[in-house]
Image (spheres, rainbow, N blue to C red):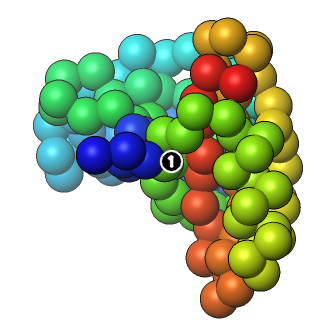
Amino acid sequence: MANQVVHFEIIGTDPARLRDYYRDLFGWSYDLGDTVSGQVSEPGQYGFVGNAGLNGGVGGGTSLRAKVLFYVGVDDVGTALARAEELGGTRVFGPDGVPGKLVVAQFTDPDANLIGLAGPQ
């Protein structure tokens, strides 16, 4: 199946507190690191979920608003983002990242739901 959900994020203004919360609730452990974009999480504040068979993370920082979102895998983030806008969505940011490795973007759908895109370009 093409365009599957490939990643999720839980972002908040106190990422350490959120990581503790989900660790205590679900037993998640984390590998702290950085995301490909400072618009996703402040440097050093992103915890990739390391033990639950999930591709996701918990991060954020005081400069970011709280949100939960998922990323859909696409071949070309820029093309998918342009198509989302053509259909009535609104670009939030992107494409941003390292082409050939990982590029991300976010948009809101016509009802203002935040959705992420991820792909190699």
In the rendered structure, the answer to whether residue 115 lies left or right of residue 78 reads left
Residue 78 lies left or right of residue 110; in this view the side is: right
Whether residue 62 is visible: no
Going 49% across and 40% down the picture, which residue do you hit?
73
Give the amino acid at mark 1.
Tyr
Q: Residue furthest bottom?
A: 111
Q: Whole-percent x and y of residue 14?
A: 60, 47
**Residue 31 coordinates in the image, percent (x, y):** 40, 15
Q: Name the residue nearer the viewer: 8 or 94.
A: 94
Relative side of 91 to 11, left or right: right
How many numbered tags mark residues here? Answer: 1
Q: Image quarter for residue 101?
A: top right
Note whether residue 47 is visible.
yes
Compare residues 105 and 38 and report the one nearer the observer: 105
Residue nearer the viewer, 75 or 32: 75
10 Å crowding of disc 1: few (<14), some (14-19), many (20+): many
Spot occupied by residue 39 in the image (x, y as percentages of width and height): 79, 41
Above or below 35: residue 21: below
Residue visible at 19% across and 51% down in the picture: 25
Q: On the image, which quarter does residue 86 sit in?
A: bottom right
Q: Which residue: 49% across, 17% down?
A: 32
In this figure, which residue is indicated by the disc labeled 1?
71
Residue 93 versus residue 23 in the image, above or below: below
**Does residue 66 lie above or below 21 as drawn?**
below
Q: Residue at x 34, y 32 (%)?
A: 55
Describe the element under mark 1 as helix, strand or loop: strand
Relative horizontal placement of residue 103, taking residue 11 as reference (left or right): right
Q: Quadrant of the C terminus?
A: top right
Depth check: 18 or 110 in front? 110
50 to 78, vertically: above or below: above
Q: Where does residue 24 sit, x and y in percent of width and height?
A: 21, 44
